[in-house]
Image (tube, rainbow, N blue to C red):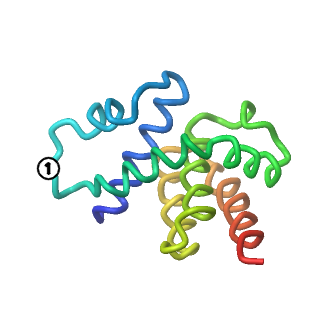
């Protein structure tokens, strides 16, 4: 697993935990990185994504709701964490190709989501990417 992929995985785990127990980002990161080797995690990316997802949460959630035609409260917490990261990357991190974001989020959905979650996540992120590129 690449450093960036590993960092995305940690970001999703932190967002998932944060949705149940909002706490300081640095505490979340410390809890999830623990004894992992420093070179296995892109801390700058991790900080950037967690901070950005939380700072832009309202817009991110509005985007998810508009594309899914569902309230975020009806989306499973793990799918929501993956979507929040993906939407954040698509809307705010233009240095990352949209295909990379979608592919990485689909990998996370296969690892952490339900059986059919990858279809839902792909649909939403594809809509966001198309709307953002217009």
Give the residue drawn at x 46%, y 45%: 51
Q: Residue at x 34, y 54 (%)?
A: 7
Which residue shows up at 25% across the image and 54% down it? 41
Counting from the top left corner in percent of width and height, residue 59 is at 70, 48
Rendered image quadrant of residue 31: top left
Q: In this rendering, is residue 61 above or below 49?
A: above
Q: Is residue 48 left or right of residue 73?
A: left
Q: Quadrant of residue 36?
A: top left
Task: Say few, some or many: other residues with alpha carbon within 10 Å of mark 1 (under 14 / 14 to 19 / 20 or more).
Answer: few
Left-right relation of 79 to 69: left
* Residue at horizontal 78 percent and vertical 77 percent from the top: 134
> Can you name the residue that lies furthest to the front here?
55
Q: Could you tell me which secondary element the residue under label 1 belongs to?
A: loop
Above or below 22: residue 76: below
Quadrant of image for the N terminus: bottom left
Give residue 63's position: percent from left, percent from top: 75, 52
Image location (x, y in percent) of residue 76: 64, 35
Residue pointed to by mark 1: 37
What is the residue that sits farthest to the right in this orientation? Answer: 69
Q: Is residue 91 above or below residue 134?
A: above
Nearer to me, 17 or 54: 54
Q: How many numbered marks are there?
A: 1
Q: Which quarter of the picture shows residue 27?
A: top left
């Amino acid at each position: 697993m690449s450093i960036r992929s590993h960092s995305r995985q940690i970001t999703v785990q932190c967002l998932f935990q944060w949705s149940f127990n909002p706490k300081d980002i640095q505490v979340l990161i410390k809890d999830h990185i623990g004894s992992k080797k420093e070179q296995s995690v892109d801390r700058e990316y991790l900080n950037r994504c967690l901070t950005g997802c939380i700072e832009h949460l309202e817009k991110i959630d509005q985007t998810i709701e508009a594309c899914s035609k569902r309230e975020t409260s009806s989306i499973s917490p793990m799918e929501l964490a993956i979507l929040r990261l993906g939407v954040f990357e698509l809307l705010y991190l233009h240095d990352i190709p949209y295909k990379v974001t979608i592919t990485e989020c689909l990998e996370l959905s296969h690892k952490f989501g339900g059986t059919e979650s990858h279809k839902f996540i792909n649909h939403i992120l594809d809509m966001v990417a198309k709307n953002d590129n217009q």
